[in-house]
Image (cartoon, rainbow, N blue to C red):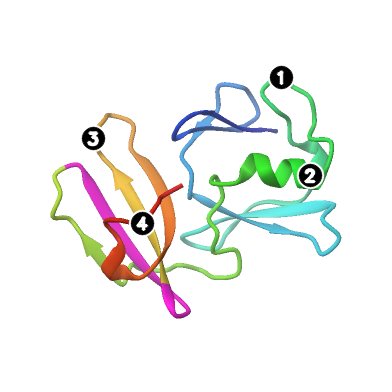
Amino acid sequence: MYLFKKLPNTWIFGETVDSECPAGIFRIEPSTDSTTVTIRYCQRDIFYRSNLPFGSFKKANGDAYASFAEFKVAYAGFFSNAESEILGNANFIDTTLATVIYEGYKAGASYRICKVDISTPIISRTWATGAWADHATLTYE
């Protein structure tokens, strides 16, 4: 299975190098020994893939990731950071801008905030963590 960042806000996640997938759809659960991962859909907490060896993931050139640390660096920004929490329905939604929607999900003392860019035919989602009051100025990945 391929997993790599192709362009800013463009990820490849799937069986071919053409399998584009937006970030933030899935969350990842590494095993305690970092040899396998389980991937779930964020919204409904449904399994996508279970107990996959991290070495089964490939880079753009088709080579497997050499270590879990390398794999973790490669997927940074793709999987939701809310690894142990089901997001559920947004607590806040800001639709004041014509091409951006912000969705705020309560996560402990702060919020997981999704920035949905609808300015192009390909909708992208990026994520940040912080105070809802700062949602327009946070750095999204």
The magenta-colored residue range is: 99-110
Amino acid type for the residue under numbered disc 3: Ser
Report x, y in % for residue 32.
82, 64
Give the class, few, some or many, for how many residues have Cα within 10 Å of label 1's Cα (few <14, many ≥20): few
In which quarter of the view is residue 111 placed? bottom left
Q: Quadrant of residue 19?
A: top right
Q: Which badge, 3 or 1, is on the more N-terminal residue?
A: 1
On the image, the x and y values in percent for residue 129 come to 44, 63
Question: Which class describes the residues within 10 Å of circle 4: few (<14), some (14-19), or many (20+)?
Answer: some
Residue 61's tag is: 1
Name the N-terminal-most of marks 4 and 2: 2
**SS of the residue at dot 2?**
helix
Q: Is residue 5 above or below residue 62?
A: below
Determine if the magenta segment contains residue 75.
no
* Main secondary structure found in the magenta portion: strand
Instruction: Please tell me which of labels 2 and 3 falls first in the chain.
Output: 2
- Indicate the amino acid at tag 4: Leu
Q: Amino acid at mark 2?
A: Phe
Q: Is residue 126 left or right of residue 55?
A: left
Residue found at x 48% / y 79%: 108
Q: Which mark is residue 138?
A: 4
Q: Amino acid at mark 1?
A: Asn
Q: Which marked residue is nearer to the observer: mark 1 or mark 4?
A: 4
Mark 1 or mark 4, earlier in chain: 1
Q: Which residue is mark 3?
A: 119
Q: Which numbered disc flags the more N-terminal residue, 1 or 2?
A: 2
Horizontal side of residue 49 vs 79, given as left or right: right
Residues at marks 4 and 2, CA–CA distance in whole angstroms:
31 Å
Badge 1 marks a residue whose secondary structure is loop
